[in-house]
Image (cartoon, coloured by chain):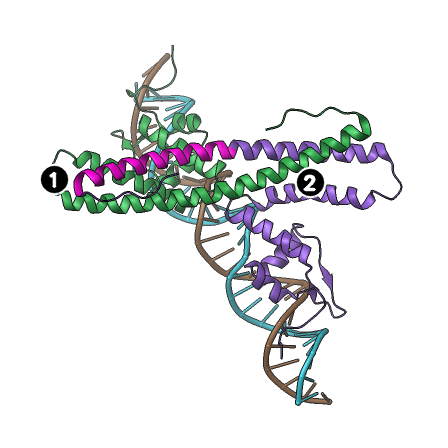
Chain colours: A purple, B green, C brown, D cyan
Amino acid sequence: MSNEPRHGEFLQIGEAAERTGLTQRTLRYYEEKGLLSPPQRMDGGFRLYSGTDLERLGRIREMKDLLGFSLAEIREMLDADEVRTQIRDEWNRDADVAEKAAKLRVAREATLHQLQLLDAKMEKMAALRDELAERMAKYDARLLEWTGEGAKAKG
Amino acid sequence: MSNEPRHGEFLQIGEAAERTGLTQRTLRYYEEKGLLSPPQRMDGGFRLYSGTDLERLGRIREMKDLLGFSLAEIREMLDADEVRTQIRDEWNRDADVAEKAAKLRVAREATLHQLQLLDAKMEKMAALRDELAERMAKYDARLLEWTGEGAKAKG
DNA sequence: ACCGACGTTAACGCGCACGTCAATGTGCTA
DNA sequence: TAGCACATTGACGTGCGCGTTAACGTCGGT
């Protein structure tokens, strides 16, 4: 009865696009730009997206839409994340501890940089928020004064 | 001794650009797009930017660079702010209270919308920050374990 | 084997937010 | 009044983040 094609836990690009709220074009574009590692393919060449891929896409979407980061910035963040995954994969295999530590340091520095960037943004954002809240309060005061109109909840 | 042209408290576009960290092209562009109300002009046509203009430009810059808003979004925010200024200017003059209240309500709603948008962004941002902080902690733990390397300050 | 839904790459197009000339005019100083 | 820095208005160019179309291949049911 189900019309959707089944490929285990994997989704074709159409379904993947629908679930993430992105377009097929966008998924291919992100892949092309290295934001998403190339997904699996069927024998004929159709892309198959895993749950991990979908999560990643969701995070990209959030960073872009809600936080306004550029794809380049997002790529940086996700790359640092990749290092973590790589390290986890290499964990059992031939352990060149020094090399792994070096990679870790790089990842740590990148993450620290992002954290600082984020903190700065949040600070500015909070300041802007306060400005807006203050403005709201003044509006409400005026409205109350003039029309007896009610104010709503505040932060 | 001073080489900079003096026009009271006003600055020509070159100085204005330098002080705001924007380019002359950008200042003209913002004016063209209505983000900045047309500045005063000298007799010959040279633009003269006031302190208020500079403040406004600074806020635009922050919203764009640090918060990643589009110029359209920023315009919305500043327009709501304009209403406030207008009301202040009309304050003494013929007081059609009902009309003023209506404008106020519009401004209030716009501001509320922006506040909610900002709060949503800040929430997501905080979540992302926590993720990054957690990642940092894990990196530091590993580094300490492997190399006895020191961790720095945390939030 | 056929067929329609679904997918593929390649290429061009578009809106935003400016950058970058080019041609010309203005302000101030010497 | 000459000269040079600084400004003005077009107009075209650019990079990003995709949208759209064209020409074609694949999948899965009948």
Q: x, y percentage for residue C5? A: 59, 77
Callout 1 amino acid: Ala
Query: Element under label 2?
Result: helix
Residue occupied by mark 2: A80
Q: Is residue B1 left or right of residue D26?
A: left
Q: Nearer the viewer, residue B61 or A87?
A: A87
Q: Which residues make up the magenta segment?
A: A121-147
| Residue at the (73%, 24%) spot, across then down | B150
Labels 2 and 1 within one chain: no
Residue A135 in the magenta stretch? The answer is: yes
Q: Nearer the viewer, residue A92 or D22?
A: A92
Mark linked to residue A70? none
Image quadrant containing the C terminus of chain A = top left
| Residue at the (60%, 44%) spot, across then down | A74
Residue B40 in the magenta stretch? The answer is: no
Quadrant of res A93: top right
Q: Nearer the viewer, residue B31 or B25?
A: B31
Q: x, y percentage for residue A1? A: 62, 80
Disc 2 crowd, CA 10 A, few/some/many (<14, 14-19, 20+): many
Callout 2 amino acid: Ala
Query: Residue C30, relative to residue C10: is it above or below?
Result: above
Query: Element under label 1?
Result: loop
